[in-house]
Amino acid sequence: MEPLIAQIHELSTSPDQFFRLNDLLKQSQDSLHSQASQLAPHLHQLHPSNHSLGYLYFLEAYTGAALSKEQSVELVPVVATFITTCSEEQIRLATDKFISVCKRFKDELMSLRTPIRGIAPLRVAIRKLQSSPEQLTTLHPDFLLLCLLAKCYKSGLGILEEDIFEIDQPKDFFLYCYYGLSCTQVQIQGRFVAIVSACEHVLWCAVLKAKPMFVRVTPAAMSTRRIGGMICVGEKNYRKAMELLHNVVTAPMSSSNAIAVEAHKKYILVSLIYSGQVSTSLPKYISPTGQRNLRNYCQTYYDLANSYSTGKSSEVESIVAIHRDTFQSDNNLGLVKQVVSSLSKRNIQRLTQTYLTLSLQDIANRVQLNTSKEAEMHVLQMIQDGEIYATINQKDGMVSFHEDPEQYKTCEMIEHIDSSIQRIMTLSKKLSAVDELISCDPTYVKKAARERHRFEFDDYDSGPQRFNM
């Protein structure tokens, strides 16, 4: 190993030598892996920043060996330091090995039950792999999983809120970009790009002008979306959670899978919490497999939704009691309890559409609450959350409901509208660019020509006929 380490020191001094060093290290891979368990002392002879490429090859080989728990504990800070301090220019020459080290790092943290230690390093790793903030890498799902396990939801949201337009590794996963918008994926001249959309299959057909040709969704991809949805649920960001879970359910699939089923169950619950309703029919653009099977697997949750639509707390609580074991085994009992508690708020919101004033006791009776004090607490909380606009007269216990005071003419509202318009204009430009790129793609042109030929009727028209009068 000493001659190899000496060459690493020598060739790491100039960027012009990095490619030569990478070729040398590739030739030494078999030797490194054969001595993997003995490489730990040699790591101290290399600097993670100055000799990043050589350090990466040594570290990748060492982490691939069978390690004891003590070795794993010692390895975690070493990998974390390397990820944080390594040179982007060098590690990008061997991104597959860098990704392998990061994934093994994540696995070690999960086995040690300390996922929080990997959040900051993996965030740095994502930035070093990205060619732009709009690129999705294969480390995104690992980062989100650690955030979920560590309950650091805000850290996960920081990544989820970014708009993604390029997918790094489509073979590993097809992440339907919920980071602000939806996204679908096509292959163009060997490169995969993301088409941002508000509704996957509608925009897909609008841009592609034909049936989807290159979509491939893997369980890892769907799991990633589900993880993102669970992070948003943890932060009570229900609107975005619904978007991501919806994308899991509507993703193309050739056979039923547990990820889509579990996502659909959570989608029903989150939809009830956020909007108070859920469609009893699946979207038309969902895959035939999903159309046939998802409802059967989620019938218990549809029963809950049907009882919720009646507005009667007693019926909802009865369904929950009957199927409590099912909700518990699905790890959805917490969400189900939130559904039950949201029904009172939903019923109070319905009252605002009918009455201008109402006493607290009347609200308690109509919403099936125990006391007027409990009704008052619900109303106060909803006013504070901006869910209703009302005032409470403490003297006579009357509640006055008001219209939305927003006049849409404040500086803040104008800035919000302007930023939304700018966002839409940017999206339109990106879609136009992708549409043009697809239209020039040889594979698409051949496919479109075959489809067009099937419906070409000009061949049956022999041209203008001359009639003798």
Image: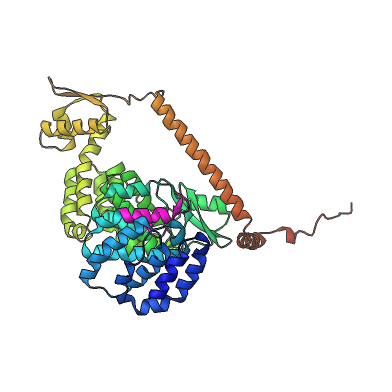
Q: Position of residue 2 (x, y in %)?
A: 38, 74
| Quarter residue 55 falls in | bottom left
Q: Give the residue at x 16% y 51%.
A: 318
Front residue of 321 and 463: 321
- Left or right of 307, for residue 202: right
Q: Residue at x 39, y 66 (%)?
A: 56
Colouring rule applied to residues: rainbow
Asked if residue 269 shows in the view, the reply is yes
- In the displayed structure, 130 sits above or below 100; it is above
* Residue 430, horizontal then vertical, whole percent: 54, 46
Q: Quadrant of residue 259?
A: bottom left
Residue 361 drawn at (x, y percent): 13, 29
Left or right: where 352 falls relative to 169: left
Instruction: Residue at 41%, 47% (x, y): give it.
Output: 162
Out of 122 and 159, give the one closest to the viewer. Answer: 122
* Residue 132 shown in magenta: yes
In this view of the protein, can residue 294 be seen by the observer?
A: no
Most extreme residue toward the top is 395
> Can you give x and y, in whole percent of width and height, for residue 6 in the image?
42, 70
User: Magenta segment, which residues?
Assistant: 120-140
Q: Is residue 155 magenta?
A: no
